[in-house]
Every structure is written in structure tokens, then in C-alpha cells.
Image (cartoon, rainbow, N blue to C red):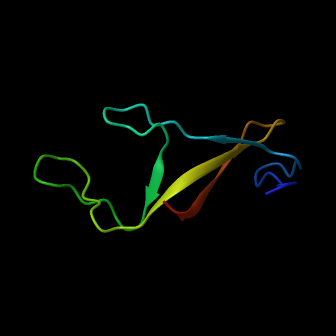
Amino acid sequence: MDDLTCTHCGTVGLSEGFIEDAGEHARGYARWIEGALERGIFGGAKRMGRPRRQIVAFRCPKCGHLDLFATDPV
């Protein structure tokens, strides 16, 4: 994803990064899960059987805007 353009200000050349998930039992990165959020009996998100995609983040060096993309299923 070279030469990405900021969707906010139009600057070319975004910096790649990731969104950290530092919560309990986290794998160290956030994931996008398809479908609306549904809560289980204990309040946690129901996610069994749903595709998961790692989130890749790009930050604009000029305005700081983040553009997020969901990668292939993980």
C-alpha cells in the first residue's frame, strides 16, 4: 500500500502502523469482526464463527488523520 493518500487532507505518503489491543487476554493487535455487536450472557462480545481481520492503520504525517483497513482473514 505504497503512496496512500490521506482521505482527510489529501497528503500523499501515510505512515503504516497498527491499533494495539492491550486488554486482558489480548493478542497485541485489534481485529475487525464482521456483523453487528451482540453481547453474550456475561456481557462479552459474541464472535464465534465470524470472520476476523487484522486492522492495519495508516497515519497522515501532516494532519494526523488515521485511515484503517481490514486485511485478509486471520
Q: Is residue 15 left or right of residue 25?
A: right
Instruction: Write the residue at 42% across / 31% down.
Output: 22
Instruction: Write the residue at 88% across / 54% down.
Output: 3
Q: Place residue 49 in its image quadrant.
A: bottom left
Q: Quadrant of the N terminus?
A: bottom right
Of residues 8 and 55, the one nearer the viewer is: 55
Q: Is residue 65 left or right of residue 48?
A: right
Q: Position of residue 20 (x, y in %)?
A: 51, 36
Instruction: Write the residue at 55% across / 40% down.
Output: 19
The mark total stands at 0
Instruction: Write the residue at 49% across / 41% down.
Output: 29
Position of residue 31 relative to residue 20, above or below, is below
Tell which residue pokes out farthest to the left in this image: 41
Position of residue 7 relative to residue 25, above or below, is below
Q: Is residue 65 left or right of residue 47?
A: right
Position of residue 62 relative to residue 30, above or below, is above
Of residues 26 and 41, the one nearer the viewer is: 26
Q: Position of residue 71 (x, y in %)?
A: 59, 61
Of residues 64 and 53, the one nearer the viewer is: 53
Q: Position of residue 32 (x, y in %)?
A: 47, 56
Of residues 54 and 5, the one nearer the viewer is: 54
Q: Position of residue 64 (x, y in %)?
A: 74, 36
